[in-house]
Image (spheres, helix red, strand yellow):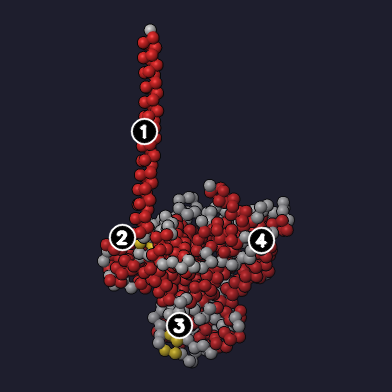
Amino acid sequence: MMKAKTSKFETCIFGESSSVNDIKASVEPSSTSSLTQTSTPPTSPTKDSPPPRPVKPSSASKSQQEVNHVINIQELRRLSSQGVPDDCSFRSIAWRILLGYLPLDTSKWQQVLDRDRTLYRNLVKDLFVPSDEHPFEEEGYKLIGKGLNRDGSTPRQNKVTKDGPSRIEEAVQAMNKATLLDQVTEEENEASTLEIPENVREQWKKSGRDPESLSAGMGGKRSRSCLNRHFNALLVTTNDTANTTTNDVQKAQKADEILTMGGEVENDFDPQWRHFLENATLLDEIRKDVVRTHPDLKFFLEPEDSLGVRRYAAIERILFVWAKLNKGVRYVQGMNEIAGTLYFVLANDENEEWAAEAEADTYFLFNTLMVEMRDIFVPDLDEADTGIHGRMANMLALLSLHDPEVKCHLDESGIDPGFYSIRWLTTLLSREFLLPDTIRLWDSMFSSTHKDNFMRYVCVCMVMIIREELLEADFGGCLRLLQSYPPTDVEKLLESSRALWIYESQVTLACHKGGISLNQALTTIAPPPAVLMAYGLKGGFAIDQIEKMREHMMRATNTRSRVAGLRRNNSNATNGSASNGKSYFRGLFTNKK
């Protein structure tokens, strides 16, 4: 069955005569060449320098025209809603298509990927100090994962670790020691005309941040030895280079922006240091959350060559660049969970050429998601329907409609909906389930055309699944259940949420279009078997409907009994007649003798 599912995905995405390797290979050479063009000029190879990575050639058996294919998005949504296969590269490509990053016409993939990946690389170069030890152009290949496996039990070693908390503390300490500003040698510092002003240092300390996270100096020509770091270091520039890709209005706003730190406004800062303080504050805020992303996953805790820390640094760059280009939202806690999950899936693509571009592609997938849910993170829009309070209210209204008993119990117990629903909505449930279950949940969510509505029904069904435990618990018990959601079957959760949506749609249509009452609709329309609760009824069955079903079953049973009785009577009568006939003839022949 799995092979059949894989075959359907391959046909849907790549067409009848093409495969994942054919289309990916047709994109890679040009993508790699564009990478080379935007990087620094090649230098003569040294004795210790690694050989250049070979470029995977295009498939010789198929021309570019043969691998071109227009994807049926409806079919892809249908297949993805049932779960994307873990093998090959189907999930990473399906997510890129479902979120609108890749066009449906595969012949346009090369153009889109070249353009967007180059744009992201330029943004990173404008904001961060380049590293000689880990050049950005080569870093993607080094951070490739060992493959995606849902149960984590294969040699690919993506399973959770028991020593996660201790490893987190090590990462936190290491990243706290990392400087936000580039480090330079003493000789360069003496020759430098650019030093960190004392008022900048004092303002940084006044804000309550670790003073060691700022380096001793900045400027001049940087040596190779001082760039051997695993973390991101900010450039100090006269202008906010992140605005080079934004419009003039944003440029003007940035030019007049004054940073507020430690409750005080500093007007005497040089513009370049004002920009630096703003960037350093933002990066420090992001870093504290990034090092706690998926803390039980070896992918982010791999000690060899500091791969885990460097993968965290990639997520840090994604979030920092996005926050700089979206100043109305900036960074909000929870975004790290979304970006981390996206990056994990893309970096574990079985095709190394695409996995090497996971960072840039994750940025654009993350940006697409934020376009749909960014209002959740904007305080001024909290009360709007698309804001966090509006979405919470819509979710609670749905729970009150279908399971008012649990809703009343939570209210009477003093459970504020914000205690659990804010985290559910802002992280897209990535912290409520194990990573494999989160990925499966996102397969269905990304295939939905109304992700907000999808989340609403899934969250309500999550409450319904544990309704018996909630009804028996007090304030503390309810809070523990909702904030530390117990393990559950994600497939059943998705099935029940879809069944509830279908049943509600059928009932609503019958009431509005058919002109019947809600009670008539509930007694007429049979709910799907996966419905947990609907309209305050367990399983969605109305009392009248249950009685009618019982009467129908009793009538059917009585009918079967009567039919069986008649058959027995007919059989007995037939047997009796045959016996009498045999006796008559037996007596006749006996008398004749």
Q: Residues within 10 Å of mark 1 (few under 14, many from 20)?
A: few
Taking the spot 27% from the left edge, 64% from the top edge, the residue there is 473
Q: Residues within 10 Å of mark 2 (few under 14, many from 20)?
A: few
The residue carrying mark 4 is: 70
Q: Nearest the camera: 240 or 85? A: 85
Report the Cα–Cα distance between label 1 and label 3: 81 Å
Badge 4 or badge 2: first in the primary sequence: 4
Callout 1 secondary element: helix
Badge 3 or badge 2: first in the primary sequence: 3
Taking the spot 53% from the left edge, 74% from the top edge, the residue there is 371
| Residue type of the residue flagged with mark 4 | Val
Taking the spot 37% from the left edge, 11% from the top edge, the residue there is 590
Residue 23 in view here: yes
Q: Nearest the camera: 448 or 110? A: 448
Callout 2 secondary element: helix
The residue carrying mark 1 is: 569
The residue carrying mark 2 is: 468
| Residue type of the residue flagged with mark 1 | Asn
Q: In the rendered view, does 18 fall on the left or right side of 338?
A: right
Badge 3 or badge 4: first in the primary sequence: 4
Report the Cα–Cα distance between label 3 and label 4: 41 Å
Badge 1 or badge 4: first in the primary sequence: 4
Residue 380 numbered mark, or none: 3
| Residue type of the residue flagged with mark 2 | Glu
